[in-house]
Amino acid sequence: MRLNSFLAFLLTLIAIITIVAGFAINFSDTFFVKEDCEGYSLILFADEDEVDAVVGKGELIRFRVVNAGSFGDKYQVSLLGPEWAVVKPDSFTLRSEEAKSLFVYVSPGLGMEGKYNLDVTVKSNCVSETETIEVGVIKEEI
């Protein structure tokens, strides 16, 4: 291969790589969500701040989640509280301005009388909200 042909080949290869790299950068900016979290927002609230539960009986507590951001998002749900409390669902997806209900089911057993805090946390890669409610466990009087 002659020197002129080699240089022409090399310059053509560099031009092709530059063009392809430019398309790839434009494509990724257009079609992939950026890592910054601007435009993401979440609202979480419970229907009640305090709930009474009777020993041996179940109680359902509703929380509401609103995606107040500009983009859809996937969320994970966690509950910090006693072992006799569970939250469902534990994950979900919401479009922008869409709302969903979460439910915490409590069923305290014997000897569990007292006051307990339940912390429900809903989070995604960009937002996190925690709502705390107080559950008063009472013994049913006969």
Image (cartoon, helix red, strand yellow):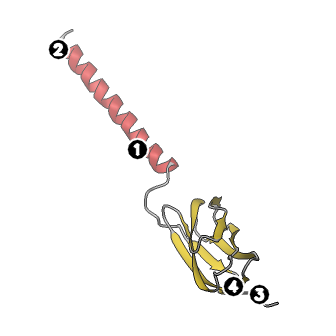
Q: Is residue 56 above or below residue 50?
A: above
Which quarter of the figure has residue 109?
Answer: bottom right
Q: Residue furthest left?
A: 3
Residue labelled with disc 1? 25
Identify the residue shown where x is 69% and y is 85%. Answer: 48
Density class for disc 1 (Cα within 10 Å; few <14, some 14-19, many ≥20) is few
Numbered mark located on residue 3 in the image: 2
Which badge, 1 or 4, comes first in the chain's sequence? 1
Label 4 to label 2: alpha-carbon separation: 81 Å
Q: What element carries label 3?
A: loop
Q: Toward the viewer: 92 or 96? A: 92
Numbered mark located on residue 140 in the image: 3
Q: Toward the viewer: 99 or 23? A: 99
Label 3 to label 4: alpha-carbon separation: 21 Å
Q: Is residue 136 above or below residue 14?
A: below
Query: In the visual, does 19 lie left or right of 138?
Result: left
Q: Residue 21 placed where, x, y %? A: 37, 37
Identify the residue shown where x is 77% and y is 87%. Answer: 140
Label 1 to label 3: alpha-carbon separation: 66 Å
Asked if the residues shown at circle 1 and circle 3 are in contact, with their CB atoms under 8 angstroms apart, the answer is no
Under mark 4, the amino acid is: Glu
Which badge, 1 or 3, comes first in the chain's sequence? 1
Density class for disc 3 (Cα within 10 Å; few <14, some 14-19, many ≥20) is few
Identify the residue shown where x is 62% and y is 61%. Answer: 90
Q: Residue 44 placed where, x, y %? A: 61, 75
Residue labelled with disc 4? 48
Density class for disc 4 (Cα within 10 Å; few <14, some 14-19, many ≥20) is few
Viewer-side label of 1, 4: 4
Asked if the residues shown at circle 2 and circle 3 are in contact, with their CB atoms under 8 angstroms apart, the answer is no
